[in-house]
Amino acid sequence: MIDLSDRKVLERYLLDKGLIDPAAGYSLTYCGGGVSCTVALVQAGDKATIVKQALAKLKVREDWLCDPNRMGIEMKSNAVYHRLVPDSAPAVYFHDPDNHVFGREAAPERSTMWKNDLLGGLLDFVVAEKAIRALSVVHNACAGDGRTRADFADKAIFHDLRISPYLKFVMGKNRALAPFAEPVVDALMNGSITLVHGDFSPKNIMVDNRRIYILDFEVAHYGHPAFDLAFFSNHFLLKAVKNRRWAASYLDMLRFMLDIYYAEMGFMDRAELEGLYVRLLALLFIARVDGKSPAEYITETPDKDLIRSLAAAVLERGIGGYGEMLALIGEGIARAGG
């Protein structure tokens, strides 16, 4: 397999595919920040393309391996999103399975990462509504769809990139969490309800003048929708701890989005979904402190201890609804002070 992290190899690859023309001019820029892929922005004329190559070993401190064939999953799931919510997901350009490479439409260069907007205190409820409605549309449209179920039946990559490094790794460090985590893992691995993005987060949503671009579909599978909801929600809890002066606003935005999602959700029992969602969210909250992929902006010991204590309280009290959970977390952050 060729290595596109070598610029000369990347240029030769793009030339061979006819994606760049030296006579017409082009530019190549490597994109940082990810841990699972080599990513480059290719600008040729008025066409901007993102080229991604999956890594077999992820760029994190802990040993973390994953099948690079996940680029095929990314291509197919990106195509589903573009078909169902075309204004919120980029177009697919090509897939090279031999080299585990995927190419898609690039978001405009002026776009901002929603994660950075949120961390900087820019809380745009229009963007939030577009994000949650896109997720809602996909979950509702794909629920019970046999073709989608067959296309995304394999959960091996989901296990390797989410279950193992987040839930099982944390259980290994803290066995007291096992009675809470084991039933959650079982539900996630055995549930086959709808298409799950697997990495739905503000980090993977670019914003351009309030238009959103949902990205990074490589962990997609046909599974339990609680994962997308909890993985997404966790980012708002983490930011509420990091920027405590805006905590109430982050939690208000999260409640706003959850209200929309649950009002539109029509494919399963609400209490069942909500109960699993709350337990999983508490476990993921801890995992972003003690898992293989800790949140890079949660660095202070008091913040980490607060996250651990709030997550434990949610689990130990058996909270089953997001309203009660958000109230508990908001009160805990307020007591901790700034």
Image (cartoon, rainbow, N blue to C red):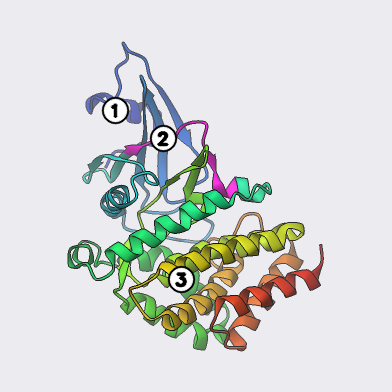
- Amino acid type, label 2: Ala
Q: CA distance from mark 1 to mark 3?
A: 44 Å
Q: How far from the left and from the top, in percent, is residue 203? A: 52, 50
- Residue 304 visible? The answer is yes
Q: Mark 2 vs mark 1: which is more N-terminal? A: 1
Q: What crowding class fits label 3: few (fewer than 14 Cα within 10 Å), some (14-19), or many (20 or more)?
A: few
Horizontal and vertical percent position of residue 76: 25, 52
Q: Toward the viewer: 198 or 319?
A: 319
248 on left or right of 30: right
The N terminus, quarter of image: top left
Q: Which mark is residue 262?
A: 3
- Report the span colored magenta: 104-116
- Spot the residue most to the top: 23
Which callout, 1 or 3, points at the residue further toward the start of the chain? 1
Q: CA distance from mark 2 to mark 1?
A: 11 Å
> Given the current orientation, which residue lies at the most extreme front position?
263
